[in-house]
Image (cartoon, helix red, strand yellow):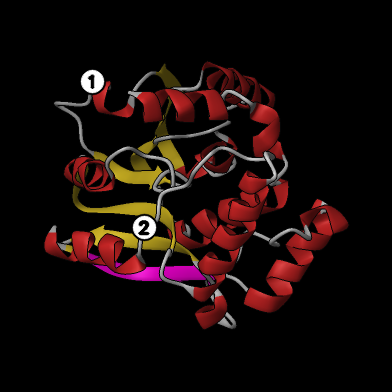
Amino acid sequence: MERKSEVKTFFEQTDIYFNFDYNIKIRTETVAEFLGETQYNNVLDMPCGNGLISLKNSQRFNQLTLVDFSENMIKLAKNIAEKEKVKNVSFTCGDIFETNFENEAFDVIISLGILAHIDDVDKFLTYIQSKVKKGGRIIIQNTNSDHFYSGLIRLYLGVRKLLGKDKYKLNKVPARVVENSFKKAGFTCENVFRYNQSFVGFSKLFSNEKKYSLTRKWFGNATKNKNASLGSDYIYLFKKD
């Protein structure tokens, strides 16, 4: 419960989320590239944050469900949905594992930016795997803790913690844990886009526009992923066989 409370407190601070606008843009575009021109009936984004990633792609969804346990994030998502004039959307503010989806399965589940924060990674992966239809897809992001760049990030965050600037601790989740979990559950990896979302201490030197352009120049996109081996962040597209 202590970890859950810590995560909730962290994500109620929506200003932190918007410091990474360039990363949200990259994730939004990656989801669009993964989905293509196909129309999907029932889509779940959990946790949705401010909902922007799914709401910007909502023209491909007949019904969109947004779930997050941050009241402030859900408020932002509702505001964005109104601004974008998205009508086919419902909102749930609450714990992921307490959502009432017992009799519902989804064509697509989007879960970006959660594995570094969740209490039980295996439990979460098993949960979302059970909530997607056969032939359905899951788009999920993970920062590979085994990657050398992740080691640099942990070193940087460790220094900040010693200086009293940061207390929040991220989970270490190796890519193999995610990939093996989906393989055992009967999923096929259809695509993966690899890049780095952190500038390791130099973030304030660049605008969001510059960080976006540098990331695209170095790593490309989901269609043509350049320098993929240097990317510690993985956005996966899995299909349930």
Relative image position of residue 195 (x, y in whole percent): 57, 69
Relative image position of residue 227 (x, y in whole percent): 58, 83
Q: Residue at x 32, y 28 (%)?
A: 96
Residue 206 seen in the current view = no
| Mark 2 vs mark 1, CA separation in Å | 27 Å
Q: Main secondary structure of the magenta part?
A: strand
Q: Nearer the viewer, mark 2 or mark 1?
A: 2
**Is 232 placed left or right of 84 in the picture?**
left
- Magenta segment, which residues? 188-195
Residue at image mark 1: 100
Q: Amino acid under label 2?
A: Val
Residue 184 seen in the current view = yes
Relative image position of residue 92 (x, y in whole percent): 40, 19
Q: Amino acid under label 1?
A: Asn
Which of 133/22 is in front?
22
Q: Residue at x 56, y 43 (%)?
A: 53
